[in-house]
Image: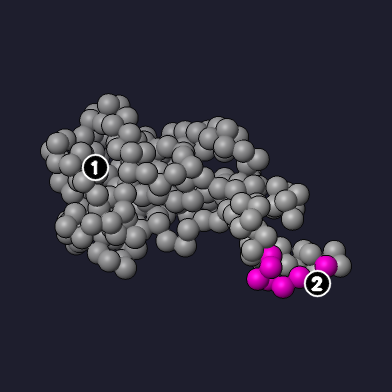
Amino acid sequence: MDEHHLEHPTMGVLGMQDMLRYEGYKVNHKRIRRLMKLMDIHAIYPRKCLSHCNYAEYVYPYLLRGRRDFEPNSVWSIDITYIPMRKGFMYLTAIIDVASRFIVGWALSNTLEARVCTEVLDEAIAKYGKPEILNSDQGSQFTCPRWVNKLKAEGIQISMDGKGRAKDNIWIERFWNTIKREHIYLNPADDGLELYRGIKVYIYYYNNKRAHQGIGRIRPCEAYNKAA
């Protein structure tokens, strides 16, 4: 079981039971669960939802409904998604400029701490200045004192998706679909370093080489630099 877990760290109790059955061992799933607990074996799997609210008092209204007149650097959108590897997974945080679809900041991590989000924001502000509005979902990383107080200190208006309204943050959701379809699923990484290097190369390509239909078939860098 220990050897199998090292080779297949995402396999849970039932998968382990199936493996043992094919090896000729008829073992009750309750016993497998007990043994896995005793051996400190825990299946690695992505959380089904990364958007559980933390503190209701830190939830803010959605400010972008009905708006289409975005200018570069006026509205940014931030989100977190999980990225699978051959063994395990990591979390990718990214901030996109809504008007240009330009990725102004990103980070790869193995935790969902709010600290990662504020660090990505700090780096983006240092490079590109501040947006007027920053939109997010109502995940725990964004409905907490650290995040809200950071945006207030920077003078950035806080916008959050309506509950259950994934399309409110459609710009970053489309980027997740694009990077996973065009890079992640085609190039499964063996480890975090390989994953980081691949994402870095792809985001440079996405920002500077790839034309985007949503902005008139020009590159995000061209659309973003209109603000300069």
Whether residue 68 is visible, yes or no, is no
Q: Residue at x 68, y 71 (%)?
A: 29
**Magenta residue span:** 25-32
Asked which secondary structure carries label 1, the reply is helix
Outermost top residue: 126
Query: Residue 102, how many percent across, how many down?
Result: 36, 40
Type of amino acid at the residue the image marks with label 1: Arg
Quarter holding residue 36: bottom right
Give the camera-side residue of 62 and 71.
62
The question of residue 28 being in magenta is answered with yes
Identify whether 43 is placed above or below 126.
below
The question of residue 215 being in magenta is answered with no
Sequence-wise, which precedes: disc 2 or disc 1?
Answer: 2
Mark 2 in CB contact with mark 1 (< 8 angstroms): no
Q: Which mark is residue 26?
A: 2
Query: Residue 124, how many percent across, how many down?
Result: 31, 32
Q: Which residue is mark 1?
A: 146
Whether residue 91 is visible, yes or no, is yes
Local crowd size for mark 2, using a 10 Å CA cut-off: few (<14), some (14–19), many (≥20)? few
Disc count in the image? 2
Q: Is residue 145 left or right of residue 208?
A: left
Foreground tag (2 vs 1): 2
Identify whether 40 is placed above or below 152.
below
Query: Residue 25, how many percent across, how many down?
Result: 83, 67
Type of amino acid at the residue the image marks with label 2: Lys
Query: Residue 70, how many percent across, how many down?
Result: 21, 48
Q: Residue at x 30, y 38 (%)?
A: 118
Give the camera-side residue of 97 and 70.
97
Which quadrant of the rendered structure holds the C terminus? top left
